[in-house]
Amino acid sequence: MNEEPQNRQETGRNPDGTFKLGFTGNPGGRPRNPLKEFSLKQFEDWTDAQKKAFLKRVSPIDRWRMTEGNPSNDVEISGEIISKVIKLDE
């Protein structure tokens, strides 16, 4: 009496809810930035006058970021670590 129904689909999950090896909860993968693609398509459809009007309202740094991306934030730290132990009178 403990038979599985024939129309039951394999979910790929273990009894604890985790996925079995080889199964995923996102078979289509991560979407590839559809908002960015939408914005680019919309900007391409504008006339030159509309583009110029829009860019007049954008700061130079934001305009640069829109075209080139954020600047690199690489930080290199060098030096010597000096530590001293101070003993307090007991």
Image: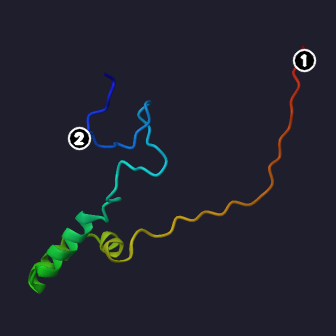
Q: Which residue is at 66% across, 63% downward?
A: 76
User: Does the rendering let one see residue 17?
Assistant: yes
- Tell which residue pokes out farthest to the top in this image: 90
Task: Tell me where residue 17 sits by quadrant.
Answer: top left
Q: Which residue is at 40% across, 39% downward?
A: 13
Pick whichever, 40 or 81, lies toward us.
Answer: 40
Q: Nearer the viewer, mark 1 or mark 2?
A: 2
Pick whichever, 75 or 35, lies toward us.
Answer: 35
User: Which corner quadrant holds the C terminus?
Assistant: top right
- Tell which residue pokes out farthest to the front in this image: 1
Q: At label 1, which amino acid type do we have?
A: Asp
Task: Tell me where residue 2 sits by quadrant.
Answer: top left
The percent position of residue 45, horizontal first and vertical second, equals 11, 80
Give above or below for 29 relative to 83: below
User: Which corner quadrant holds the N terminus?
Assistant: top left
User: Which dot marks residue 17?
Assistant: none
Number of residues whose C-alpha sits closer than 10 Å to that of mark 1, classed few (under 14), some (14–19) or many (20 or more): few
The mark tally for this picture is: 2
Of callouts 1 and 2, which one flags the residue occurring earlier in the amino acid sequence?
2
| Disc 1, SS | loop
The percent position of residue 23, horizontal first and vertical second, equals 42, 50
Residue 80 appears left or right of 66: right
Q: At label 2, which amino acid type do we have?
A: Asn
- Tell which residue pokes out farthest to the bottom in this image: 48
Question: Which residue is denoted by mark 2 in the rendering?
Answer: 7
Q: Which residue is at 83% across, 46% downward?
A: 82
Q: Marks 2 and 1: in contact by CB < 8 Å?
A: no
Number of residues whose C-alpha sits closer than 10 Å to that of mark 2, classed few (under 14), some (14–19) or many (20 or more): few
User: Which dot marks residue 89?
Assistant: 1
Real-space CA distance between mark 1 and mark 2, rounded to the nearest whole angstrom: 79 Å
